[in-house]
Amino acid sequence: MEKVKNRENTSNKKRKVDKSVIGQTTITAFHDSTNLPEARINRINCALVKFFIYCGIAYRIVEHPFFIDFLKELNADYDLPTREYLSGRLLETELCNVNEKMNEDIMNQHNLTLGK
């Protein structure tokens, strides 16, 4: 436990200030300061749906405070969808995308025999 404690505290140690650097680092260097565009939100939502489906995670986790904190740390401007929206509309959209890609693959096949 002592080794883990020491390992975790290494990032909390104060660093010597480099006198050659002019100015101070701003908070925007560590967090996104602009609003997320709609296309970015859609990509995040799509990745979130895939994560829940492929990992078999219950949709109720999306409303857990620790999960919300985790996502807010990744990007503070992202508003997490509700579990109903995630398991409803977002899941249906992803299902349509997958089915469309499968149909395209089937249509592009030559000498394909289905059935008996």
Image (cartoon, rainbow, N blue to C red):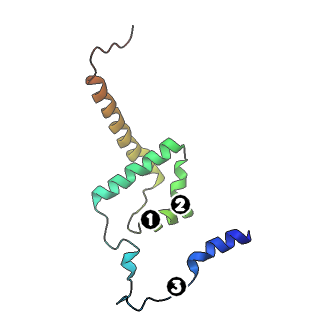
Name which of mark 3 and mark 1 comes first in the sequence: 3
Q: Amino acid at mark 2?
A: Phe
Select label 2 or label 1 by which is in front.
1
Q: Distance of mark 3 from mark 2, alpha carbons? A: 31 Å
Decide which of 85, 6 is in the foreground and name it.
6
Name which of mark 3 and mark 2 comes first in the sequence: 3
Q: Is residue 15 left or right of residue 96?
A: right
User: Marks 2 and 3: in contact by CB < 8 Å?
Assistant: no
Residue situated furthest bottom in the rendering: 19
Q: Secondary structure at mark 1?
A: helix
Give the residue pinned by disc 2.
Answer: 67
Name which of mark 2 and mark 1 comes first in the sequence: 2
Q: Total of numbered circles in the picture?
A: 3
Q: Residue 92: x and y, percent?
A: 38, 41
Q: Quadrant of the C terminus?
A: top left
Q: Distance of mark 2 from mark 1, alpha carbons? A: 11 Å
Q: Residue 99: x and y, percent?
A: 34, 32
Give the residue pinned by disc 1.
Answer: 74
- Give neighbour class at mark 3: few <14, some 14-19, many 20+ (Cα, 10 Å): few
Q: Is residue 36 left or right of residue 52?
A: left
Q: Secondary structure at mark 3?
A: loop
Give the residue pinned by disc 3.
Answer: 15
The residue at 42%/56% (across/down) is: 81
Q: Amino acid at mark 3?
A: Arg
Quadrant housing residue 56: top right
Decide which of 71, 59 is in the foreground and name it.
71
Q: Amino acid at mark 1?
A: Leu
Q: Work out whether 43 lies above or below 98.
A: below
- Give neighbour class at mark 2: few <14, some 14-19, many 20+ (Cα, 10 Å): few
